Image (spheres, rainbow, N blue to C red):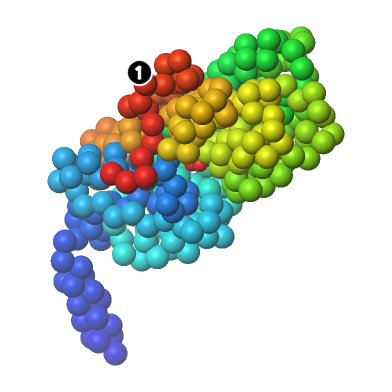
Amino acid sequence: LIGAMVSVGALLVSCSGQVGDSGGTDSKKLVLIPGVADEPFYISMQCGAQEQATKLGYKLDTQAPTKFDAGSQTPVLTGVVANKPGGILIAPTHATAMANPIKQAKDSGIKIVEVDTALDDTSIALSSISSDNKKGGALAAQTLAKLVGDKGPVLVINTKAGTSTTDARAQGFEDAIKSFPGITSLGVQYNNNEAAQAASIVTATLAAHPDLAGIFATNLSSAEGAATGLRNANKLGQVKLVGFDASPKQVEDLKAGTVQALIAQDPAGIGAKGVDQAAAAIEGKPVTRKIETDMIAITQADMDANSKYFYKRKC
Ligand code: T6T
């Protein structure tokens, strides 16, 4: 029996083929696990990661959950870990609920890099690449304050509590808006990363506060949905809307004047830098624990000059 076990063990080792030097993982393979499938922010991230992986001689697969939540992302991660890639680039969908599954991946010898979102526990990933989201929230507050002429009630539509990036944006906004004494914040409401829920929040808020002056939507789904809500209520342009991200629909909304400003990120840069860090870790080179990527506020007036920041539906 002992002999059989040994030979089974030996068979497993010899069958793993491209085993590298990092604990039986396939050192030339990387997997990107975005927050959710088929979404322009993550598609653009995938494009950047793919291009950089090819440049560095790595194979990159993308495995995305169907919903932006830990319940959907965990089984995707577990399946990826079973195939033992050398590195995983992951956008954790929850700052604490994803900690255990990601730690298990790390403990199995896989190099972990956080792209965009991050865990509260900073001891698990080797590197985190993202926008400065708190600063982005503050930038949104300054932009919206100017648009509403420094007065009136404003609302924050956020995605899901526990998402590191959007929580930081809402916090940055709330902190910065306090320095405009004519503006009152109506607080934060959550749309569960569903555009339709953001539209309903706008409808309900306008019923309670017909004088609503402005909205900060913390990401793509909340901004796309808020624009729909304002259109349904015939409040386009009257209620000023600043949204994070720059999906094709958000860009159309900016062009149409439905949205007054977009805070665009650099998802392709996040993906490419994520690949750099995973490759460095696999190759035993130094890694950088925290890397900040670009962010820019775009208005209708300068949208043509800034089209390179627009997100893609395909590479
Ligand atoms: O805003 C991005 C991303 O930065 C955030 O973490 C989650 O939402 C997006 O993917 C846009 O939907």
Q: Quadrant of the C terminus?
A: top left
Q: Quadrant of residue 176?
A: top right
Q: Nearer the viewer, residue 190 or 163?
A: 190
Three-letter code, disc 1? Ala
Q: Nearer the viewer, residue 12 or 292?
A: 292
Give the total of numbered labels. 1
* Label 1 near ligand 1 (CB < 8 Å): no
Q: Residue at x 56, y 39 (%)?
A: 224
Q: Nearer the viewer, residue 266 or 315?
A: 315
Q: Quadrant of the N terminus?
A: bottom left
Q: Residue at x 47, y 49 (%)?
A: 35
Q: Nearer the viewer, residue 212 or 84?
A: 212
Q: Which residue is mark 1?
A: 305
Question: Residue 80, how many percent across, how many down?
Answer: 37, 61
Is residue 53 in sight in this rendering?
yes
Q: Residue at x 84, y 34 (%)?
A: 208
In the displayed structure image, the side of residue 208 where residue 253 appears, left or right: left
What secondary structure is marked by label 1? loop
Q: Quadrant of residue 226?
A: top right
Question: Residue 215, how many percent across, how many down?
Answer: 66, 27
In the displayed structure image, the side of residue 280 where residue 38 appears, left or right: right
Q: Residue furthest front?
A: 234
Considering only vertical position in the picture, is 160 above or below 16? Answer: above
Is residue 104 in sight in this rendering?
no
Considering only vertical position in the picture, is 152 above or below 155? Answer: above
Q: Residues within 10 Å of mark 1 (few under 14, many from 20)?
A: few
Q: Residue at x 62, y 18 (%)?
A: 144
Q: Residue furthest right?
A: 208
Question: Residue 306, how many percent across, how many down?
Answer: 37, 21
Q: Quadrant of residue 257?
A: top right
